[in-house]
Amino acid sequence: MKILSWNCQGLGNPQTVQNLLLLVKDKTPNVVFLMETKLVASKVEGIKRRLGWEGCFVVDPMGRKGGLALLWCKEKEVEILNYSQHHINAMVRSEEKKMSWLLSGFYGHPVVSKRKNTWDLLSLLNSASEMPWCVIGDFNEILCQTEKMGGRPRPETQMVDFRKALDDNRLFDLGWKGNKYTWSNKHMDSTFTKERLDRAVANLKWSETFCDRVVETLNVVQSDHMALMLDLRQQYLVNRKRRRLFRFEAKWIRDEEGAGVVERAWRRADVDPNPIRNIQRKLNGCKGDLIRWGNSKDKEVIALLK
């Protein structure tokens, strides 16, 4: 399954609609989430028919601003749960996995003073479900200064609020493939600025279910925003050997050497402003170190037995 997310900044322009149709034809997503459509439901329905798709849900814009749309290829794949001017919440049925998961198309408030309201919205969406959950869209915020190039530095308080919103809701950034920066002001002078405003995040249940997912940034002609393609890559799992689960062996910690492996892994320097990601990195590093050390000890035992 593939989910396409794009802040299209107005579907009233025929060229924008043509870019969307070409994008869908080329990348073959199953679901498309659009932000700033600036178009009423009846007009978006026309785009659905041009795609030859079966499902469409629209949040009408407020005057000439905003507007969201979720379109999907097969009627039975998606069920709309709730919505607002800043989100569309849907249940997605995965035939390959024989399961359902929660998809939230999300649009962070463009006005800084009101952005905290959308972080509160994230918490409301989180409290409504303990299912595998993925959130994708334009958050209108960055996590750290390295996600911005050019222009004035982002106020630290804004980034702290965003990081806290993700941490509080146990959502992890799914990363990217391609261009890091998803928005640009397109200026051709010293005021040129680009930022990573669009992203996909998910909870642990979702991440463990779709461990081979990829988030790719896609360039769209004449658009300030790049599109995101979340590819769950289930087709690649069919013939792949099942990955061996990591299990901690109690004997490792009883060995002085093993205890040292854990201690060294945990003392590695923090390199990420997000404390959750730092813990994840240390856990993964500790796991790898223990597997390598454990394998070497097993080989020593086998050699002695011979």
Image (cartoon, rainbow, N blue to C red):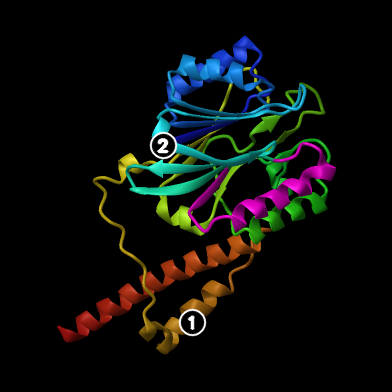
296 with respect to 239 (left or right): right
Q: Is residue 278 above or below residue 97?
A: below
Is residue 153 at least partly visible in the picture? no
Mark 1 or 2: in front is 2
Tell me the element at label 1. helix
Segment colored magenta: 108-135
Q: Is residue 185 above or below residue 177?
A: above
Q: Is residue 129 above or below residue 47?
A: below
Numbered circle sitting on residue 77: 2
Q: CA distance from mark 1 to mark 2?
A: 50 Å
Which quadrant would residue 70 be assigned to in this image? Answer: top right
Q: Position of residue 285 (x, y in %)?
A: 48, 66
* Residue type, label 1: Gly
Q: Position of residue 169 (x, y in %)?
A: 62, 58
Neighbor class of circle 2 (other Cα within 10 Å; few <14, some 14-19, many 20+) is some
Pointer 1: what residue? 260
Residue 119 falls within the magenta-colored stretch: yes
Q: Position of residue 139 (x, y in %)?
A: 68, 41
Which quadrant would residue 1 be assigned to in this image? Answer: top left
